[in-house]
Image: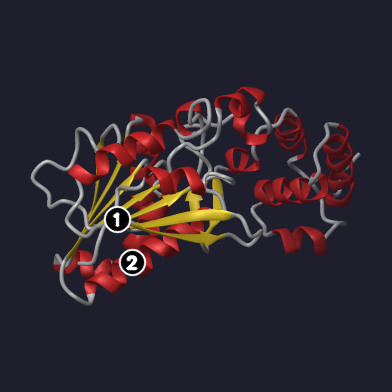
Amino acid sequence: MSVTIGDALQAATRRLRASGSETARLDAELLVAHLIERDRAWVIAHPEAAMVEADALDALVGRRASGEPIAYLRGFKEWHSLRIGTDARALIPRPETELLADAAGDEIERRLADGPVAAWEVATGSGAVSIVLGLRFGSALAEGRLSLLATDISDDALSLAAENFAAHGIRGVALEHADLLEGAGDGRPRPDVLIANLPYVSTAEVDARWGSLGFEPRIATDGGFDGLDLLRRLMDEAPGRVAEGATILLEIGAGQVEAIGEMAPAGAIVEVVSDLAGLDRVVRIGLGQR
């Protein structure tokens, strides 16, 4: 008996809903669209079409029912109007991180008006933020007016970032292995703009394995007891490694802005950008005027 897309969607939705998914119908539509290589709108509009990949869908639905993120099942995340390759080598780009990418781009653009700029993204993961910057400032990179270095402590993440750079035609952005500000950047100018989306989730939350946290690499999520371990380290190291008058841009978790402000060097100007939910999400720390 042939199975239609409508039948497949209904069965997948029931199974996902029973597993506790709050987005069961959306998940089912995305998985069907992925398998038949159509967009979600087409799937919704053609319930009568044959679902010839029913067995493959059953396998994917089973993985999704166990909690595996849609981004890993499809192999990409639609983020900042881009398709970023995703798998278990790195954190899945979050919508909130678009704010960090935009803030970094605006800061670089402002500084380019005055002269050459050096920027450094720490903990690049999938490379998403640096890809946005590489696309926005392709000419500045090619002309040598901007130097951009993306680093990560995970070789797995760096390999995924390299694949994503290649897929998006990113040129002129260097990838290096580094533990925060140690072990990379030799021979390069100190960064005028330092960008970081470090792990800021507490160990207890990671241990609870809620949502995608049970599948993403722990090195990309676990920020220690209060989620601030790596942010503390970065703020300790930064004053001695960045250029005079540098700007530090950090993505943070809810309720962490006060602690970040206390970590900032004396005399620094601390500003906050909120996300669409009104939560403090990006902190801009100015270490003086350039």
Report whether 230 appears left or right of 73: left
Label drawn at residue 267 = 1
Say what amino acid the circle numbered 1 marks.
Gly
Residue farthest to the left, as pictured: 187
**Viewer-side residue, 5 vs 62:** 62
Q: Is residue 259 left or right of residue 59?
A: left
Q: Position of residue 249 (x, y in %)?
A: 38, 54
Is residue 188 visible in this depiction of the protein? yes
In this view, the residue in front, 233 or 221, is 233
Q: Do the residues under discs 2 and 1 have CB atoms within 8 angstroms?
A: no
The structure residue drawn at horizontal position 53% and vertical position 44%, both measured from the top left corner, is 256
Which circle's residue, 2 or 1, is located before the other in the chain?
A: 2
Residue at 38% in and 36% down: 232
Report which residue position mark 2 lands on: 107
**Residue in the image at 89% along x and 39% along y:** 14
Q: Circle 2 — which element?
A: helix
Above or below — where is 129 with respect to 216? below
- Which of labels 2 and 1 is toward the front? 1
Q: Residue at x 23, y 72 (%)?
A: 112
Image quadrant containing the C terminus: bottom left
Q: Position of residue 236 (x, y in %)?
A: 29, 37
Which coloring applies here? secondary structure
In the picture, measured across the screen, residue 134 lies left or right of residue 93, that is left
